[in-house]
Image (tube, rainbow, N blue to C red):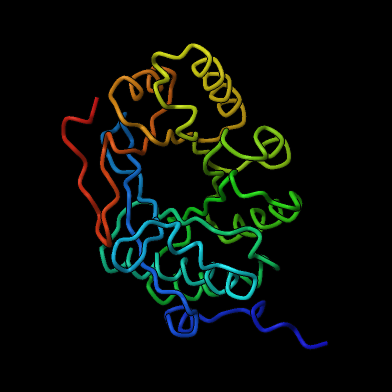
Amino acid sequence: MMEIKPFEPVGCKECRDPEKLGIQFTMAFQPIVNVRDKTIFGYEALVRGINGEGAESVLSQLNDSNRYKFDQAIRVKALDLAKKLNLQGMLSINFLPNAVYRPETCIRATLEAAAELDFPTDRIMFEVTEGEKVKDHNHLKNIFIEYKKQNFTTAIDDFGAGYAGLNLLADWQPDVIKLDMSLTRNIHNDRVRRSLVFGIITVCRELSIKIIAEGIECEEECKTLFEQGVDLFQGYHFARPGFESLPSIREEAWL
């Protein structure tokens, strides 16, 4: 039986061709900082329109015929720009789990691009958002297992805001979870959020899972989480995403 074309492995040359994809896009980069060491842990690559439009303007163009190719293309684009910008530390890329059919096959374009650009796979972190409803948890687990074989770091993004929650952690333990801003927002003034987040921190400590606190917008949020042992942070308090650039950290943001 002939395999359906959109599901075929995409070489990284094809990933760089916007005409074949039918969607024009680029990336912005937001730093992830280590407050304890006052260093940059890495950068998350965020989808943007070519004129700076938000991610939704690009993602709204996805359908069953182009989702697979787009998922491949965003990985290659992120790597291309990371190399061009001389990005140091971790490169974090969001992927679409429902676009990955066979993990060992779908990862080829990423590996090809990483080898071509001499970008080590152990500096690539793949995030799956908890907000995207994954139809088959075993499928996601198999994706993560394959990615670990290739030395990629695995992460659950927007943890606490989506469909899976602790059920997903029970099935599979990623290297990193990123606490959603709905949990970290105003945490210093919210006893319920503090209790929930401190519980998650305890679980992750027991399971040797790193935590990145997302959506940090003020010093008080950062301090509250830092005092509980969270070192890695991301949010406007430190830097807004840079359009095709690596923004610097506000000096006054460090604790």
Q: How many marks?
A: 0
Q: Is residue 142 above or below residue 180?
A: below
Q: Residue furthest right?
A: 1
Quadrant containing the N terminus is bottom right
Q: Residue at x 51, y 19 (%)?
A: 193
Q: Is residue 240 above or below residue 57?
A: above
Q: Position of residue 114 (x, y in %)?
A: 44, 70
Q: Residue furthest bottom?
A: 2
Quadrant containing the C terminus is top left
The quadrant in which residue 23 appears is bottom left
Q: Residue at x 47, y 61 (%)?
A: 121
The quadrant in which residue 156 appears is top right
Q: Residue at x 67, y 32 (%)?
A: 166
Q: Residue at x 39, y 69 (%)?
A: 25
Q: Nearer the viewer, residue 68 or 109?
A: 68
Q: Nearer the viewer, residue 207 or 254?
A: 254
Q: Relative to 80, is 60 on the left or the right?
A: right
Q: Relative to 5, is 38 on the left or the right?
A: left
Q: Nearer the viewer, residue 34 or 13?
A: 13
Q: Position of residue 88 (x, y in %)?
A: 30, 55
Q: Position of residue 186 (x, y in %)?
A: 39, 21
Q: Relative to 78, is 145 on the left or the right?
A: right
Q: Relative to 200, is 243 on the left or the right?
A: left
Q: Nearer the viewer, residue 79 or 130?
A: 130
Q: Position of residue 122 (x, y in %)?
A: 47, 56
